[in-house]
Amino acid sequence: MLKAKFKPEQTDRLAGCLAALGLSPNAWTLLSLLPAAAGMAALIDGRLGLGLALFSLSAFIDIVDGTVARVTGQSTARGAFLDGVVDRYVELMLYLGLLFYLGRGEFLGLPYEVWFMLLFFGSLMTTFVRAYADHRGIVKGEVQLKKMGGLLERFERLMLLYAGMFLGLFNTQWMVAVIALTVVLANLTALQRIAFALKR
């Protein structure tokens, strides 16, 4: 996971500055919804560049909120739960915004709506498989859960989509191709996690 590879010193100093603003980690988590909602509205309005900038801001807040919690000693299970829930809402807003931005069309013989349905399914299954394996006790402990990994976890998935949005500023079909690639990798990641759980 790329996000896990960030060194603490790369984010701690910035998190310390943000913590000085007085917002709680949960407040930072909820704050990420605002630029995401604005980004969705921008995409629906046909402004891809603005949408990309706003969703990138939301992703930035998502990266630092957990660091703020750690730096201030306020890391909690409820905070982690809220972060995961908000992540799903942000993704949904991104997918809806992109779908409305693209409108009607096809890629490799499939309507855009089908591609986004498969993207949303792959994203949900990637998260669900890990949570359900933990719930059933098939994969136990945070260390083992992290080993589930996969080709394309949420952070990488969003970074790939944002890269596609950037390419879309020059050619819409390039963005659509990246979305299709994300669909394939997201669903392969879910299958990887299923295989990992069944081997335990």
Image (cartoon, rainbow, N blue to C red):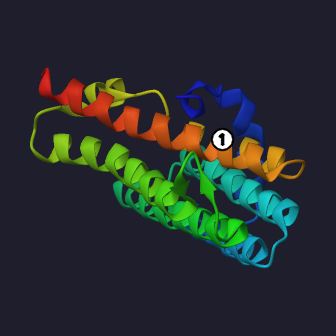
Report the side of 35 relative to 67 (left or right).
right
Report the side of 77 relative to 46 (left or right).
left
- Number of residues whose C-alpha sits closer than 10 Å to that of mark 1, classed few (under 14), some (14–19) or many (20 or more): some
Residue at the top extreme of this rendering: 199
Where residue 7 appears, as percent x and y from the top left, is 65, 25
Most foreground residue, 140 or 90: 90
Q: Is residue 158 above or below residue 188?
A: below
Task: Report the number of numbered marks.
Answer: 1
Q: Is residue 153 visible?
A: no
Which residue is labeled 1 in the image? 178
Three-letter amino acid code of the residue under disc 1: Val
Q: Is residue 30 above or below residue 116?
A: below
Where residue 143 appears, as percent x and y from the top left, is 31, 26
Q: Quadrant of residue 93?
A: bottom right
Q: Is residue 188 above or below residue 62?
A: above
Most foreground residue, 157 or 149: 157
The residue drawn where x is 26% and y is 25% is 144
Where residue 49 appears, as percent x and y from the top left, is 87, 60
The residue drawn where x is 70% and y is 65% is 102
The residue drawn where x is 50% and y is 67% is 89
Report the side of 80 relative to 140 (left or right).
right
Q: Is residue 167 above or below residue 146?
A: below
Viewport quadrant of the C terminus: top left
Where residue 91 appears, as percent x and y from the top left, is 54, 60
The residue drawn where x is 38% and y is 58% is 81
Most foreground residue, 139 or 150: 150
Q: Is residue 30 visible?
A: yes
Q: Callout 1: helix, strand or loop?
A: helix
